[in-house]
Each structure stands twice: as structure tokens, then as C-alpha cells.
Amino acid sequence: MKGQDILLLIKLVSLDNLRSTNLKPTKLDQKLWGWNPDNEVKALLEHNDHLLESVGNIEYLFTLRGLSEQLGISKSEVNNSMKRCLNVQLAKMNRLTKRPEANRRALIEFISHGIKYVFPVKPAEITRGIPTTFSAPVLQEKLLSAGTLKMVWPDPRGKEMGQAIDPLYKSVPFAVKQDPDLYSYLALIDAIRMGNARESNLAIKILAERLGK
């Protein structure tokens, strides 16, 4: 297993939630991420508009090209990642839709008991970035960590300063800016990767509820 495999599996969960609830993807909010309107940001906003238009054809979002565009991973690597996930039964093909989907029960079991050993993480230098673990919105109102520095995925356009946490894969900051649901899931997973009992147990509880165990 590789970090991008978990990113792919969680994206499949997010897309399945999108499909089952008939929701529309959230339009990017520049203020949320503290961006400046330079050319790179404009390109990302245009990219997000393209994905919003694609939701009318949900099938596209599940294709190798669609997943590649959403995750910032090459099509060949998405394909390789999908094969690995299918081989270890963390993903499966839906017999009715013929689309790949995450094996949610197996996924929460792996995340709860194994991910901190396979993808351990330790806070590093102070940097600018996107809040994760207990610093992310999904946990920050449920878990008070007074006197503790924020944890962030390094991102030069992030609006928060904190200790750097290596994301599961280098394109995570790109992917979460387009998908608040994906952001919440990955921040919860980071809390589990950290291995601190209080944060980990709460994150596992919330993640299990969201994955529908």
C-alpha cells in the first residue's frame, strides 16, 4: 500500500456520498484558503469550474481521467493505485454501477488499527499551511488542545501557521481544496496517524460514523 492508495479510497467514498445524496460539489472559496488571485489560483478555480460542470455526468468523475484531475495524480498512477486497492480488497467493483468503490468496512478497520504503523507521522518545523488533525474544522470544535501548536499540511498559500505534517501524498493540499468532504476525512485520518490516544479515539469514532459502519 502507498499513501496515494488511501487518498484514492477516500476520494471514492466522497464521490459515492456525492452520488447517493445528489449533492453538488462545493465551489472553491478563496477566502477559506487565504489565496491571492494570481495566475495559479485562477487556473485552479477554472479547473474546479470544469469539475462542477462534470457532475452532471457523474460517471466521468469515477474514470481514470476524472480521478486524476480531482486528485492531482497521473492516470497511470491512479490505475496502479486502483489495482493495489482491489488486490487487497480495500476496493471493489460495484456489480450494478460497474464503478469502483471503497470497501468501507475493511477501510475503517485498516485505518483504525493499521494506518499509524504503515504511515506514521511526526510534527516537524513551523510552516504555513492547511490545518489538519485536531486543528481542522472537523475536530477543532470537538477537541480542545490548549497550548498546542496547530498541525498543518505545508502549503505556501495556507493561511495558518503550525507544525508541518507530511500528508499521505504530496497532492493532498491540491485535492482537498476542491472537496471539503475529502478534507474532513483526511484530517481525521491524520489524527489517527499521530497515534495520540485521545485524538485518535475520537477521530476513529467520527470516521466510523461517517463511513457508515
Image (tube, rainbow, N blue to C red):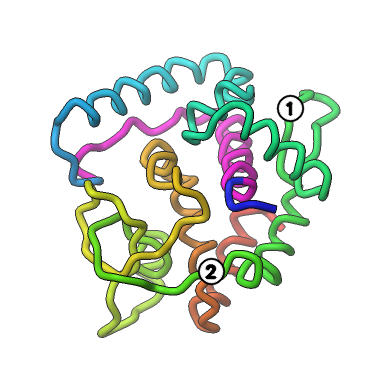
Q: Amino acid at mark 2?
A: Ala
Residue at 71 percent across and 43 percent down: it is: 102
Q: Count residues near mark 2 (Cα–Cα under 10 Å), then give few for <14, some for 14-19, many for 20+.
A: many
Residue extent of the magenta highlight: 5-32
Q: Amino acid at mark 1?
A: Arg
Left or right placement of residue 202 versus residue 155 in this view: right
Residue at 45 percent across and 74 percent down: it is: 122
Secondary structure character of the magenta stretch overall? helix
Q: Would you say residue 104 sits in the magenta stretch?
A: no
Q: Would you say residue 14 sits in the magenta stretch?
A: yes
Residue at 50 percent across and 36 percent down: it is: 71
Label 2, on which residue?
A: 203
Visible in this render: residue 192?
Answer: no
The answer to whether the residue labelled 2 contacts the one labelled 1, judged by CB atoms less than 8 Å apart, is: no
Q: Secondary structure at mark 2?
A: helix
Q: Where is 53 relative to 170, above or below? A: above
In x, y percent, where is residue 5?
A: 64, 46
Label 1, on which residue?
A: 99
Name the residue nearer the viewer: 66 or 184: 66
User: For the residues marked 2 and 1, what is the alpha-carbon distance in whole angstroms?
Assistant: 28 Å
Q: Quadrant of residue 80?
A: top right
In x, y percent, where is residue 117?
A: 65, 72
In x, y percent, where is residue 178?
A: 39, 36
Q: Secondary structure at mark 1?
A: loop
Q: Where is 17 relative to 197, above or below? A: above
